[in-house]
Amino acid sequence: MSTERRRARRQATKLWRTRVLRTERVTPRMARITVGGPELADFAGAGTDENVLLYLYETTEGLPDPLTLESARTAMSRNRPYMRSYTIRRHDPSANEIDFDFVLHGDHGPASAWASRAVPGDEVIFVGPSPAYTPDPSAPWHLLIGDETALPAIDAIIRALPGAVVKAFIEVEDAAEEQDLPGVTWVHRNGVPAGSAEPLIKALSAASFGEGQPAVWAAGERSAMQAVRDHLVSCGIERARVRPATYWRLGHAGS
Ligand SMILES: Cc1cc2nc3c(=O)[nH]c(=O)nc-3n(C[C@H](O)[C@H](O)[C@H](O)COP(=O)(O)OP(=O)(O)OC[C@H]3O[C@@H](n4cnc5c(N)ncnc54)[C@H](O)[C@@H]3O)c2cc1C
């Protein structure tokens, strides 16, 4: 395990209290929120799909001071935050900045609603980062699959695989949601509701794959990812290689 990853493991349960520095609408349905400040000076990245658990409080008034993971837990019976996972899109240790890309799927989700209204100065509290996915260096090729919530993770995994054979499929609403990620096959829903497996399965069925068993990383809506897994297994990929992560569940709050 690298020094960087060991440091990330050690700090995995630390609570970070930062502020929004700037916001940007990367695409119509994706908000990039840059957070940071001197508090992040000893934040060590974990790599690839590292993510954090955001604590979204209705109000931060009356929270314990100092706010640590332990004191926040103790206060949870009085002030329980919504907890949502988000991937670190970019970490710049020299500037003490972290970017998160939020899918704006509507105001019914507290995280999506918060991101659509976030302004510089807003407080951002999170715990992490999680340990990250380590791609198998001996795999003949790598298959990465997800919807737009997995875009930040897939981008990071691709960047960790220079020179490797990578096939990446990312489902987004339409062409306006594509980002500048070389080599990705963009799969457009074109009106099919998010959370359906249909667009990804159609794209995977039309793709030609290389020889040998790939290392597979997949994440998105739970049932959709289960259907994608079944499809890959029916195409000859060993079931044990396909363990998709649930990033969200249709009709259920939380991740
Ligand atoms: C490890 C991990 C990393 C993640 N990284 C990211 C990331 O970088 N960017 C990102 O945008 N998301 C990411 N997600 C997914 C995100 O945590 C969920 O989408 C989360 O449920 C959103 O919270 P919310 O409060 O907006 O909605 P919730 O309160 O959780 O849900 C409200 C309703 O919205 C629906 N819903 C939730 N998410 C979506 C969606 N994406 N599209 C359509 N409907 C939805 C639910 O089914 C529910 O009906 C990640 C999840 C995990 C587990």
Image (tube, helix red, strand yellow):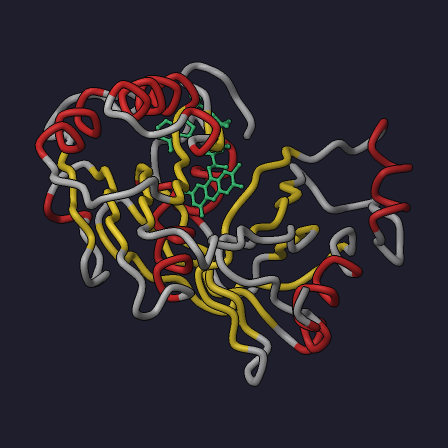
Quarter of the picture holding the N terminus = bottom right
**Based on the displayed image, in which of its 4 quarters is residue 147 positioned?**
top left
Residue 190, by quadrant, is: top left
Q: Residue at x 39, y 51 (%)?
A: 139
> What residue lies at 29% left-to-right and 56% top-to-bottom?
25
Kindly give the residue lying farthest to the front in the view shown: 212
Measured from the top left, where is residue 54 in percent x and y? 62, 45
Horizontal and vertical percent for residue 28? 22, 48
Q: Is residue 116 left or right of residue 245?
A: left
In the rendered view, would you say 138 is above or below 4?
A: above
| Closer-to-camera residue (62/107) | 107
Q: How many marks?
A: 0
Q: Residue at x 14, y 32 (%)?
A: 203
Compared across the picture, whether 214 is left or right of 90 comes to left
Identity of the residue furthest to the bottom in this view? 94
Which of the four quarters of the rendered structure image does ligand 1 lie in?
top left
Q: Position of residue 65 (x, y in %)?
A: 89, 56
Judge whether 245 appears above or below 186 on screen.
above
Q: State which quarter of the image contains the C terminus.
A: top right
Task: Please report the residue visible at 19 percent of the width from the left and 20 percent of the height from the top.
Answer: 198
x and y percentages locating residue 27 in the rendered image? 23, 53
